[in-house]
Amino acid sequence: MRSRRAASSLARRPGGYAFEHPISQEYRFFRAALAAAPREGAVVTLAVETVPHLPPTWLAVQRPAWRPVDADAIGAAASEHGAGVFLLLDRACFLDLSRFAPGELTDGARSDLTRRVATPFGAMRPHCAQALAALPWRVVASRSIVDAPTPTLEMPTLDGRARVALLRWDHP
């Protein structure tokens, strides 16, 4: 009987039951933004820190023909791939490492607790801000995501919100 109730409950909500936590908002945003993006291109890969950026395997499923480009090689990628170079600013770009418990951080991350860079998207981790400043990007899509009321469930951000975005390099 319970399974019938559950099935009928899901039938009334064709989208299913999605928790409105920042992580689900982020994945839904990027899934929709990437679905509208070109099939071919190059995507800038950002340095992996304590909390990694969108998983490469997830991104490969969304856009299998996109080639990864190291953040240090953005300029070369721009000349090689033309305007098909993309940058994804995910919530890890806005992460506030100072709000993690001492045992949750690596030594490298611990030495970088207070570094933040002001950007048009808000306070950001230095490696994301550096990639953002490397080329003239055009915003394809963006969404502001507010931190969860229960910080233990989510990644705390520097400003209490993250303006996640899909950016595309525009020819100068």
Image (cartoon, rainbow, N blue to C red):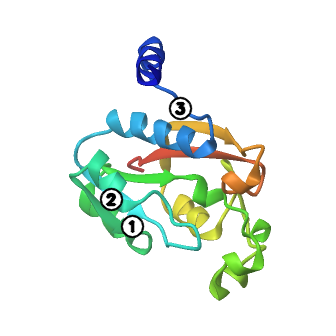
Q: CA distance from mark 2 to mark 1?
A: 24 Å
Element type at marker 1? Answer: helix
On the rendered image, what quadrant is the N terminus found in?
A: top left
Name the residue tied to disc 1.
75
Question: What residue do we see at 72% from left, 46% from top?
Answer: 147
Question: What residue do we see at 29% from left, 54% from top?
Answer: 60
Label number found at residue 57: 2
Question: What residue do we see at 72% from left, 69% from top?
Answer: 97
Query: Between disc 3 and disc 2, whose residue precedes?
Result: 3
Rate crowding at label 1 as few (under 14), some (14 to 19) or many (20 or more) other CA atoms within 10 Å: few
State the image coordinates of residue 108 (x, y, percent, origin top left). Answer: 64, 86
- Visible residue check, residue 168: yes
Cβ atoms at labels 1 and 3 below 8 Å apart: no
Label number found at residue 18: 3
Is 59 situated above or below 129? above
State the image coordinates of residue 127 (x, y, percent, origin top left). Answer: 57, 70
